[in-house]
Amino acid sequence: KKIVFATNNQHKLDEVKKITEGLIEIVSLSDINCTDDIEETADTLEGNALLKARYIKEKFGFDCFADDTGLEVEVLNNAPGVYSARYAGVAHDSEANMQKLLDYMKGTDNRHARFRTVIALILNGKEYLFEGIVKGTIIEEKRGDQGFGYDPVFVPEGYDQTFAQLGSSVKNSISHRARAVIKLHDFLLTYSDK
Ligand code: ITT
């Protein structure tokens, strides 16, 4: 079954396509000629994921899913969280976002953080949510050049390299996004029974 992934983030699209290879056929927004920048006005990951999925369903009529992801840092009371993309003020400036985070955490012993992805699926008029979490720590200086966003400062639990050093095959086997996507896949597998 084909399903539209409502994202403008090419990195997310690449990751999800890899994770679902041979399992789900992913259609991108550019495949449906949508270049809209969907405004994310909710104050939760769940809310923004639903908002993006509903926008595509309402405008184009396709069943679809959307991903909203945040980095939740314990000592910052789970900030930047839903505001991860525009933490430093300018949307999608990953360098500035990471710098602000490292500055705020300077001298802090508690480095615990987690990535949390919420996927919202709209299928046959109903809405479903799937969550994926990976725990880890924020290091003191960026390391690695793979991945995207906050990957250079995040070391997943059980590893001593960042997502940006570990690369896509390791990231895609343990990440927040992978865990949410696997739940989505398992749901779709058994869907016909529901
Ligand atoms: P959409 O079109 O899907 O909304 P986006 O880039 O706006 O794409 P989000 O609203 O979920 O995505 O923004 C979350 C921000 O968190 C994003 O800009 C990245 O900087 C960061 N981020 C998301 N997933 C990440 C990942 O797997 N690794 C590192 N950083 C990530």
Image: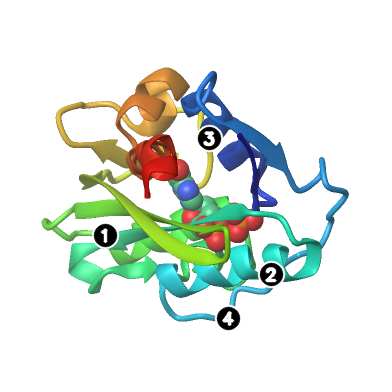
The quadrant holding residue 36 is bottom right
What separation in Å lies between label 4 and label 1 (alpha carbons)?
30 Å
For the residue carrying disc 2, how many other residues have a C-alpha within 10 Å: few (<14), some (14-19), or many (20+)? Answer: some
Identify residue type, mark 1. Lys
- Is disc 3's CB within 8 Å of ligand 1? no
Q: Earlier in the sequence, mark 3 or mark 2?
A: 3
Asked if the residues shown at circle 2 and circle 4 are in contact, with their CB atoms under 8 angstroms apart, the answer is no
What separation in Å lies between label 3 and label 4 (alpha carbons)?
24 Å
Q: Compare residues 28 and 164 and report the one nearer the observer.
A: 28
| Residue 106 shown left or right of residue 17 in the figure | left
Between circles 4 and 1, the one closer to the viewer is 4
Q: Please identify the quadrant where the N terminus is shown.
A: top right
For the residue carrying disc 4, how many other residues have a C-alpha within 10 Å: few (<14), some (14-19), or many (20+)? Answer: few
For the residue carrying disc 1, how many other residues have a C-alpha within 10 Å: few (<14), some (14-19), or many (20+)? Answer: few
Q: Compare residues 49 and 185 and report the one nearer the observer.
A: 185
Q: Compare residues 41 and 32 and report the one nearer the observer.
A: 32
What separation in Å lies between label 1 and label 2 (alpha carbons)?
40 Å
Asked if the residues shown at circle 3 and circle 2 are in contact, with their CB atoms under 8 angstroms apart, the answer is no
What separation in Å lies between label 2 and label 4 (alpha carbons)?
12 Å
Q: Earlier in the sequence, mark 2 or mark 4?
A: 4
What is the number of the mark on residue 106? 1
Label 2 belongs to which residue?
55
Give the vertical position of 183 relative to 38 (above or below).
Answer: above
Q: How many marks?
A: 4
What separation in Å lies between label 1 and label 3 (alpha carbons)?
33 Å
